[in-house]
């Protein structure tokens, strides 16, 4: 799954936990320009790949790389 985690969300956290339980690959995108702390559930999870981005082009690049690794 690909999840945007710049703003903590119980729903997104639930989806990440379900995906982890199903052994799915997980990419979490985090906007590095926001002055918010990333959720400890996400940042401390070794099964989650975190990609920081500053603009849409960087986010898309991270997503493209993530899916290339899956094929």
Image (cartoon, grey):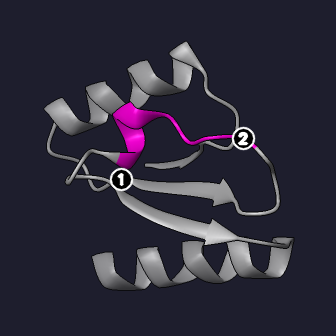
Neighbor class of circle 2 (other Cα within 10 Å; few <14, some 14-19, many 20+) is: few
Residue drawn at (16%, 35%) of the image = 22
Q: Which residue is mark 1?
A: 26
**Front: mark 1 or 2:** 2
| Residue 27 placement (x, y as % from top left) | 44, 58
Magenta segment includes 42: yes
SS label for mark 2? loop
Q: Nearer the viewer, residue 31 or 63?
A: 31
Question: Residue 7 sits in which quadrant?
Answer: top right
Question: Residue 60 sits in which quadrant?
Answer: bottom right
Residue drawn at (65%, 83%) of the image = 61
Neighbor class of circle 1 (other Cα within 10 Å; few <14, some 14-19, many 20+) is: some
Left or right of 63: which side holds 54?
A: right
Q: Which residue is mark 2?
A: 36
Give the extent of the magenta segment.
36-43
Query: Vertically, is 12 above or below 45?
Result: above
SS label for mark 1? loop
């Amino acid at each position: 799954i690909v999840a945007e985690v710049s703003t903590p969300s119980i729903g997104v956290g639930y989806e990440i936990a379900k995906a982890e339980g199903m052994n799915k690959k997980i990419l979490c995108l985090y906007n590095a320009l926001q002055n918010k702390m990333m959720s400890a559930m996400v940042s401390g999870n070794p099964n989650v790949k975190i990609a920081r981005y500053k603009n849409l082009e960087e986010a898309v690049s991270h997503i493209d790389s993530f899916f290339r690794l899956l094929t």
